[in-house]
Each structure stands twice: as C-alpha cells, then as structure tokens.
Image (cartoon, rainbow, N blue to C red):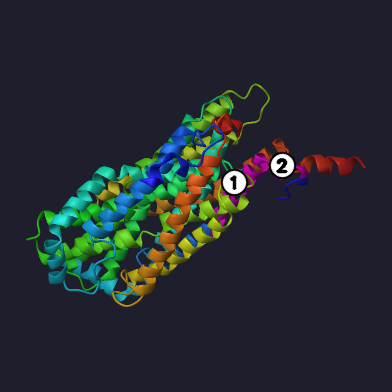
Amino acid sequence: MSILSPDRYITRADKSPAGRPDVRLVTWFFPVWYAAFGVIICLLARVTPPPRPDVSAADKVAFMTTHALTIQVGFVVLLILLGGAGMTNALVAYQMSRMSTGPVLAYAYIGGMGVGALPGFLLVSVCFLTATFRPDRDPELIGLLYDLGMLSYNGSLGCFSAAYLVLAIAVLYDKNEIFPKWFAYLSIWQIVTEVIATQMFVFPAGPFAWNGSISFWVAVVVFSVWLGSLIFILRNTAAREPVDTDETFQGPTAG
Amino acid sequence: MQILEQVQDLPKAGNIKAQWVCLWSGPAVGLVLLVALLAFPGFWPPISPTLPAEEVARFYAENTAWIRFSQVTFNLCGIMVVPFFMVIVAQMKRMHGQSHVFAYCYLTALVSGATFFALSNIFFLVAAFRPERDPELTMLLNDLAWIVFIAPIGMVLCQFLLLAVAVKFDHATDRNGAAAIFPRWVGHYSLVTGLAMIPSACAAVFQTGPLAWDGLLSFWLRNGAFAAFMIVMFFVLRTAVLRQAVDDGVIADPEARLGASATR
C-alpha cells in the first residue's frame, strides 16, 4: 500500500497535496480507468491482441462461441464504464486549455476523441455482443459482425490522429510548459502508427493485417509508451498547477 | 503573419497562432479530401441505389483498390477538418452581446455530425475488405455506408442554423461601436446552406429521383453546398482572425502602416 501513503503524493510545505483537488481526483481516475479498460479488452473481450482476420466464417463463429461468456462479461462492463473515456479525454483537454495556445486546440482534441468513441470503442462492443447474442445465426452474418467490429475498433484512425495532431501542436507552441516538449514528438509517433495501420484494410494477413507485427504490435508498443508517459505527465502538471488563482476560469471570457 | 516580438510569449499570441494553424489546416486537409473524392469510383457517378446485389458486389470486386485508397484517406483525414471548424467556435465565442452558448452548441453538433461521417467510411471499407462476401451482405454494407454518409444531416443542419443565429445576435448588439465578428451576409449564407442540407435526409427512403442518394438534391446539392461553404468560410475566418490579431495587438495593423507610409 506504500503507493497510497501520503509521502508518495507531491505535497506542498504544509503537507497538503499539491494542485487542485478536483483535477487531482480526475488525474487519479485516469490510470484507474485505463487499467480497467486494459483488463476488459485484453483478458475478457479478447479484442486485444485481436483475433485473426484470415480465417473462415466457421472459425469466426467458433471464436465467438468459445469466448462468448468473457466477451459478454467484458463488453457489458465496458458499456457501463465507457463514459470514463470521455472523462480521461476531458482531463487532457483541460490541461491543454491551460496552455498558452488557449482553448481552440483543446476543443479540437475533445472533438477528435469524441468522434472516436463510437467507431473506436462502442461499435466493436455492440458487434461482438450482437454476434454472441445469437451464435446460431448464419455464419456469414457472424463473419460480417466480426469484420465490422475488428475493422472499426482497429481501423478508426483519423479521429484519433486528429486529436494527437492538435495535442502535438498545442504542446509545441505552449509557453506555459504544461506538458514537456518531447511528449509532442511521442504524439506524432502515434500518428505514424495510425498511418501505417491504414494497411489493415488492404491486407487480410501478414505484418500489415489488423493483427500484424507492424500494423498492430508496433502500434501497441508506441501506444503503451504514450499512455504511460501521459499518466505521469498529467500527475506532474496537476501537482504544479497553482491552486489560489482562478485564471483558468477566466480563460473562456478573456478571448 | 508576423507576430510582434514584444507579445510573442503572451497567451493572446498563442491563441492567435493556434487559430492560424487550425485555419490553414482547412485547405491542406481539404486538398487531400478532394483527391480522395476524385479517386472514389463510387462518386463518378454516384452508385445508384437501384443497383442489384450482384452488380454492387461486382463494383466492389472490380474497383477494390481505388475504393480502399479513397475511403482509407477519408478515414485518416476526414476528421482532421475538425480543427478548422474550431476556428468558427473560437470566433463565435468572441461575438458581442451573447454568452458562449451558441458556440458550445455548435461544438457538440459538430462532434456528433463528424461521428456519422467516421462511421460511413468504415462501412465502405468493410464492404471492400472482402469483395467475395455474399452479395446480399455487400449490398447491406453499401446501403448502410451510403445512408449513414448522406442522410443524417440533423447535426450539420444545427451547425449552420447556430452560426446564422449567432451572427444575427452579434449584429443586433453592434451599437457600442465594436465591429461584428463576421459580416452580416455570413449568417444568411449559413442559413441557406443549412436549408440545402435538409432534402438529403430523404435519401434514406427514396431509391430514384433527386432525393435518392445519387440524386441532384441529396448528393450534388448537399455535398456541393457543404464544400462551397468551407471554401467561403476560409476567407471569412482568415479576415476575422487577422482582425482579432490586430485588435489584441499581436500583429501590426497593416492599414495603419499603409496610412503612415502614405503621409510620409
């Protein structure tokens, strides 16, 4: 439990935790939500690492029936928790709005990530849940739901790329040092993986397929580094945020 | 745009720079989307809704590469127009005599509308992923893609109406000498563009005629009006951001400089 003991927080001189209490709460929520999300997609719903694209309709039905219980448990929990994605994105947008670039890019980040919620997360949940709902359906139809779920989940690229792009621009232009500059370059690498991932729509097998070594595994490594860095950056920047000024609330009217 | 040295570290300069980048992302992304538009074989002419399933499946089998190229480009770059629209949001927030409520309504409408667009190219791409699929299913995906692409215009309609109302309110309170953010005609133009979107909702019902998804109203008027609006708004926004930059003292006033050289 040492990670939860008070001296693990960044504290001020009077031993109270640094930063605003509300921002601190959401900053703690961020890694907790991603941990739950990781358990759901990797261990329960089995969509990461993804099942193979190069299999017959009968194999897709077999996948759905073998993992029916965990898919249903995992995705039902995700249906309940999905709103947390909005909160994590809003936290990043909040920190972006504190940058000297102002709220424009923060809104664009909310926009890109907000678009991503439906094709990027929700569609695969309802596709897989519909497939496991009646596994005795025509195998061709199960195959369609499998393809649609996988391609929307792994292949919704532009919404996230747009968000990474505005994040990178905001961090590079920012004079308030809210996020470190190297994080902008890491975000650009995220865009690179999304561009490479476009090839999954062309190749049903091999390194560029949706489960391929380049399309998928390189993206997973970059994403893990990006997310891990973001968790620590958010924590540090939340701790550095001045508490007694209300300048962030004047921001929108000042423009 | 030359930002004055003495203000370049201030938030107001950062705000202008961010808007300027977002503004110019518009033509850059627009050019890429134009290439995708020209490359999609299903737009020249638009695939007829009356095509039988075998013909639809053959279309996907014969044009697989170009469909993939163009729709992947829409997938990757389509949502990158969002920053451009954020300049409209930022300028709406500066309008006089109103709270930010229209701007935030515009923002939410934009995000929901863009979600439909992001969904449509996934359907196109799933259809092109396995052209050998049962033709009935390829037709199902094709129908879904087209109906999701053309018909759900409620969100963009709201965007155009909100902008029109915001411009109207901005002008109504323009007695205190401050100039309106956008010229008055932008509001009327936005309203007309919004009205041009409405008929295409019927593309989800009609298979032939001007209201079908390949029809004059649902395809050409809707998409043409939208593209024209984006081009016009680029110039309107450019003027508005430049004026904001001058008003905030971020760049030198070009007219003042011209005046100074004329008197010399």
Front residue (pair B66, A89): A89
In this rendering, position of residue A54 left or right of residue A231: left
Return the x and y of residue B194 as percentages of the image width and height: 43, 40
Looking at the figure, which quarter contains the C terminus of chain A? top right
The region drawn magenta spans B6-28
Return the x and y of residue B201 as percentages of the image width and height: 31, 45
**Chain identifier of the residue bearing label 2 in the image:** B
What amino acid type should be assigned to the residue bearing mark 2?
Val
Earlier-in-chain disc, 1 versus 2: 1
CA–CA distance between discs 1 and 2?
13 Å
**Residue B23 visible somewhere in the drawing:** yes
Return the x and y of residue A219 as percentages of the image width and height: 40, 65
**Residue B156 visible somewhere in the drawing:** no
Looking at the figure, which quarter contains the N terminus of chain A? top left
In this rendering, position of residue A218 left or right of residue A128: right
In this rendering, position of residue A221 left or right of residue A65: right
Q: Residues within 10 Å of mark 1 (few under 14, many from 20)?
A: many
Residue B44 in magenta stretch: no
Q: Residues within 10 Å of mark 2 (few under 14, many from 20)?
A: many
Residue at horizontal 57%, vertical 33%? A251
Q: Residue under label 1, please give it.
A: B19
* Most distant residue in the bottom direction: A206
Front residue (pair B208, B180): B180
What amino acid type should be assigned to the residue bearing mark 1?
Gln
Residue at horizontal 70%, vertical 44%? B9
Q: Residue under label 2, please give it.
A: B250
